[in-house]
Amino acid sequence: MADLPTTPTEHDAALITTQEHLTFNFELALPGRASSLHTQRAYFRWVDDYLVRVAGLPPTAGAKRRERMRALPVPLLQQSLTAPQLRAWLGILVREGQGKQGVGQARAALVTLASLLAEAGWIDDYTSAGMGNVRPPKAEDGQRPGRWLSPEQIRMLMTAGRQIATSDNQRLRNQVVMLMLCTMALRRDELSAARWGDLSVQNNRAVLKIHGKGRKTASVDIPKSVLNALERWRRVVAPNEARPPAESPLIRRIWKGGRISDDGVTVDGIWRIVAESAEAAAIGHVAPHDLRRSVAGALQVSGVSIDKISRLLRHSNVAVTERYLSRLPQANEGAILMSDVLGLEDDFDDDPFAI
């Protein structure tokens, strides 16, 4: 094994040499370019997708994805990181319906990886610059289209979250997850990062300290329904303690048989709970962010002021919330009203969608 220097630089420390292969620790090198944990996880996801599609590696998630990011095979990267392949991959994302924001982030992830490798001397500057010059193909503005669930669909989803559980402990855990997503409008990474110490009482109000994007923090009032679910969950997490340790994960993994792990649920684990609940509820594909979107939409429809919605979503200002709400599929009843004006009636005796 080659000797490592006693005082390595950041990029030197990110390289591991063995007789069999050379690997690059993307997780170690990335914080200098992307300080937000949310952005880092997104970059890991895009790099993994690129290596699956371009280099033929099997997909990973959760802990296995982080393991891959810590040991990216340099020879494979040298073959796969080229401007033409990056351009082709971005084109695939656009054809699959990925929005402008997602495509831009995907490009940034691969360009950043190439730049770090060039700084470390493992690909040439010409290749890195060529990838940096790749312009993303045109995609629809904004975020990828999502779902806006009705309150009834949300209740069905929450019920299904309990029904898919295979143990009492998992049922309690899933109830906490679904309640917090469906009332407090948490992002999945915010829920995954929550700790017991983030719960507190402020001015006689129970609140949760949320670690959001860009290392920002905010406090959100906890509804009584969530408090009750958290108390039932606490009794099984720490039955012999008044409260679990402050730094321990609020949402835990559940082993087969119902045993509660000391490890927290990953962002991918949150995704699976929501996706499996949606499948069990037979309401189609639902992503965790769809629940955040649905909370905002339901509050808007019920007449809640935009400043209250903005505080719940923890946006930097109300203008951001206005843009967010404008992307929701608003009702457009003009065609229905025109049909009524013309006095048109339904001529179908059977289901019109069964044509």
Image (cartoon, rainbow, N blue to C red):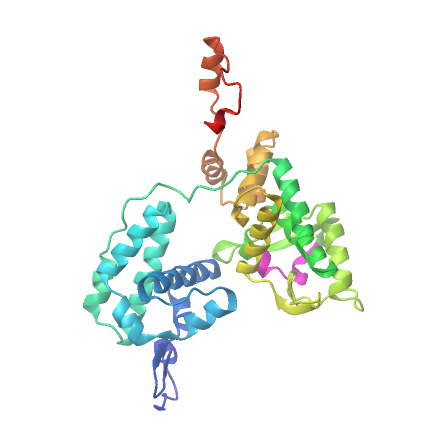
Q: State the residue at coordinates (57%, 32%).
A: 300
Q: State the residue at coordinates (63%, 36%).
A: 151
Whether residue 196 is in magenta: the answer is yes
Could you tell me what secondary structure mostly forms the magenta stretch? Answer: helix
**Along the line of sight, which residue is nearer the eye, 305 or 47?**
47
Instruction: Report the magenta residues as a range.
Output: 191-200
**Along the line of sight, which residue is nearer the eye, 126 or 333?**
333
Whether residue 193 is in magenta: the answer is yes
Q: State the residue at coordinates (34%, 51%).
A: 93
Quadrant into which the C terminus falls: top left
Quadrant into which the N terminus falls: bottom left
Q: Position of residue 130 (x, y in %)?
A: 21, 61
**Along the line of sight, which residue is nearer the eye, 353 or 60?**
353
Q: Residue furthest left?
A: 126
Asked if 291 appears above or below 164 in the picture, the reply is above
Q: Is residue 82 left or right of residue 219?
A: left
Count of number-bearing discs: 0
Q: Position of residue 16 (x, y in %)?
A: 37, 82
Q: Position of residue 272 (x, y in %)?
A: 56, 56
Asked if 143 appears above or below 16 in the picture, the reply is above
Q: State the residue at coordinates (27%, 75%).
A: 122
Q: Is residue 335 left or right of residue 196?
A: left
Asked if 308 appears above or below 186 in the picture, the reply is above
Q: Position of residue 243 (x, y in %)?
A: 75, 64
Q: Can residue 211 be seen by looking at this rendering?
A: no
Q: Can residue 249 be seen by looking at this rendering?
A: yes
Q: Quadrant of residue 78?
A: bottom left
